[in-house]
């Protein structure tokens, strides 16, 4: 692979390329050492991740570099959610929701994986297709999944509530999707098992958003369209 081809490939990865990607593409180690030398054409942004010198700096550069590190030998466009989805605080920040600081890069994978980076946190969970989307070129959990994950992670409920309200106000997710996702948090919130509507009402009451009545009505309408659940698991309205 010539330098021009490296540059062309990096353009489809926000101007970034990993050392492993270049090696697998046939770039000799001596060439990489020359290209990554100080003042050369590849600037180091993380261990094994480089940015084309002079290329526009992408938003969330550190997050993108950390995501590339999860599977350094796989090009961004060839990856699947099984190789890492942006989640939790990092996902909220990518959407611009709430005010929780993303002081670590958080990803969810379906299998256990370790990292040596203290600023990267990996969560293990299988994500169905409906729980993630592509945002700014990255796979990221939907806001409803973010809220449920953060509650499961014992985050401040009021901070999570702000994320929920911001997401609903911005039409990033439907109230019914929040109800479904938050149902798993009902018991730990002191509500009836499966009462996702109760969890959603509790959170929205914490922030007092004027859109709350409309969002709750839409959530109830969603529940009314669902098939009846087995006795003992139907949520309270």
Image: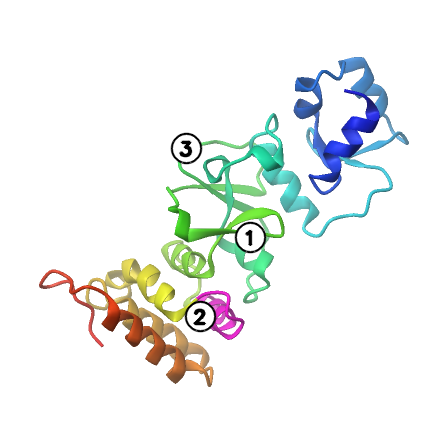
Coloration mode: rainbow
Left or right of 19 on screen, residue 144? left
In the rendered image, which quarter is residue 55 located in?
top right
Of callouts 3 and 2, the N-terminal one: 3
Residue at the (19%, 64%) spot, across then down: 227
Label 2: few (<14), some (14–19) or many (≥20) C-alpha neighbours in 10 Å: many
In the rendered image, which quarter is residue 28 located in?
top right
Any part of residue 45 in sight: no
Q: Is residue 136 above or below residue 169?
A: above
Q: Which residue is most to the left?
A: 231
Q: Is residue 42 above or below residue 90?
A: above
Which range of residues does the magenta coloring cover?
A: 159-173
Q: x, y percentage for residue 179?
A: 33, 66
Principal secondary structure, stretch drawn in magenta? helix
Q: x, y percentage for residue 226?
A: 23, 66
Q: Nearer the viewer, residue 79 or 88?
A: 79
Q: x, y percentage for residue 199?
A: 31, 69
Look at the image and tell me in which quarter the C terminus lies.
bottom left
* CA distance for labels 3 and 2: 29 Å
Q: What residue sits right under mark 1 in the picture?
A: 90
* CA distance for labels 1 and 2: 16 Å
Q: What residue sits right under mark 2 in the picture?
A: 161
Label 3: few (<14), some (14–19) or many (≥20) C-alpha neighbours in 10 Å: few
């Amino acid at each position: 692979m010539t330098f021009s081809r490296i540059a062309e490939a990096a353009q489809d990865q926000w101007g970034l390329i990993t050392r492993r990607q270049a090696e697998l593409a046939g770039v000799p180690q001596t060439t990489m050492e020359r290209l990554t030398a100080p003042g050369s054409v590849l600037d180091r942004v993380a261990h094994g991740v480089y940015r084309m010198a002079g290329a526009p700096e992408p938003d969330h550069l550190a997050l993108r570099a950390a995501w590339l590190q999860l599977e350094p030998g796989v090009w961004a466009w060839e990856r699947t959610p099984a190789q890492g989805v942006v989640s939790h605080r990092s996902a909220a920040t990518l959407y611009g929701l709430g005010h929780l600081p993303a002081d670590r890069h958080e990803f969810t994978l379906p299998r256990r994986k370790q990292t040596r980076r203290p600023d990267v946190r990996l969560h293990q969970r299988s994500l169905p297709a409906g729980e993630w989307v592509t945002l700014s070129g990255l796979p990221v959990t939907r806001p409803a999944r973010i809220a449920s994950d953060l509650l499961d992670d014992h985050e401040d409920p009021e901070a999570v509530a702000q994320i929920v309200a911001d997401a609903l106000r911005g039409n990033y997710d439907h109230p019914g999707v929040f109800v479904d996702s938050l149902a798993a948090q009902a018991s730990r919130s002191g509500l009836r098992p499966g009462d996702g509507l109760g969890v959603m009402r509790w959170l929205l009451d914490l922030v007092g958003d004027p859109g709350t009545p409309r969002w709750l009505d839409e959530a109830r309408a969603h529940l009314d369209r669902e098939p009846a659940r087995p006795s003992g698991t139907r949520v309270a309205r």
